[in-house]
Amino acid sequence: MGLNIRDIVPRRQLEHGELKGKVVAVDAFNALYQFLSSIRQYDGTPLQDSKGRITSHLSGLFYRNVALLSEGIRLVYVFDGKPPEMKAGTNQGRIERKDIANEKYKEAKEKEDYEAMKKYSQQNIRLSTEMIEESKELLMAMGIAVVQSPSEGEAQASYFVKNKEVYAVASQDYDCLLFGAPRLIQNLTLSRKRKTVSGYVEIFPEIIELEKVLNSLQVNHDQLISLGILVGTDYNPGGIHGIGQKKALQLVQKFKQPALIFKQYEELDSEWKKIFEMFKKPSVDKNAEINFPKINEEKIKEILLEHEFSEERISNSLEKLKEAKEKGSQKTLF
């Protein structure tokens, strides 16, 4: 689900230390879903404490962010607010698919089919209000800035980059390019190694620069938004039937103007204008401030020990966190 333009977007691998001293705005929900999806037990279920409370997101937030902070990266987590009305259909569809996946997981569990259990468990990821608030608490206790967006987190994060308040957006999605973010970093919050059928493969952070994307595709930003709408966004899942990334690129290069591009497709009618405006003029808080709180070791321990994390491992990571914070406090934004 969502925008997929991976095959036509140029990117490059980030060099080690390239982000040192820079501020990166993380699409919080995107990262949390990553942690919930990837940090799991052998049967596909997320990590839990003895009371059955999910802890995968806390594990990812703490250990992965300690590693990033140790590399000299300063982090801002931007959380989603109220979703736009146009996204209601997308969200409802996701809920229905999760319900179906939950039923299939139960069937697989009865058969002790662990591969199927893992598959359907990952399709049934749910983020509760309690998990979100707990995540914010942990992040702030770690000295990481937290910003609440009025609507789409990616839009707010993109606004920060455009205003040069942060260097880049970190997300696995491509939507922030349509929101106008000059730089998008992917794979930043992922583990550096991923298990595959043939063994482990290394995962490297990659940077996608909007200017290079536009130059490579020979389009302007309005045309890129139009391309995204043709392919399909969260506001119009699936896009136009039969149109993939490359065909969409050919269409925007041929017709150039959004009105002429969408004149060919009656099914979008005037809907495309609303979607177009969602990306051109998204709901953001232009007065939002980025504040980096002080590290609160006691609060970190309180949250993690409540969920039965290893005290020794917490202490070891806290030492790294303090060292990283001391180094990072002397860095500027760029």
Image (cartoon, rainbow, N blue to C red):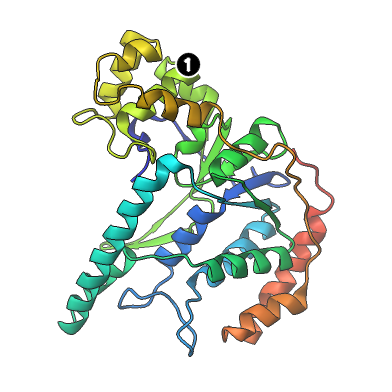
The residue positioned 15% from the left and 82% from the top of the image is 111
Q: Residue at x 33, y 66 (%)?
A: 124
Q: Secondary structure at mark 1?
A: loop
In the displayed structure, 302 sits above or below 235; it is below
Q: Is residue 90 above or below residue 221?
A: below
Residue 2 x %, y %: 37, 42
Q: Is residue 20 above or below residue 31?
A: above
Residue 326 visible, this angle: yes
Image quadrant where residue 10 sits: top left
- The image quarter containing residue 217 is top left
Residue 105 image position (x, y, % from top left): 24, 73
Q: Along the horizontal axis of the image, is 230 left or right of 302?
A: left
Amino acid type at image mark 1: Asn
Instruction: Please tell me how crowded label 1 is: few (under 14), some (14-19), or many (20+) other residues with Cα within 10 Å.
Output: some
The residue at 51%/23% (across/down) is 212
Count of numbered marks? 1
In this picture, residue 154 sits left or right of residue 301: left
Residues 32 and 205: in front is 32
**Can residue 14 be seen from the camera position used here?**
no
231 displayed left or right of 126: left
Residue under pointer 1: 220
Quadrant the C terminus occupies: top right
* 76, 269: nearer the viewer: 269
Q: Position of residue 47 (x, y in %)?
A: 44, 78
Which residue sits furthest right? 330
**Most distant residue in the left direction:** 111
Residue 70, given in percent of the width and then of the height, sits at 68, 60
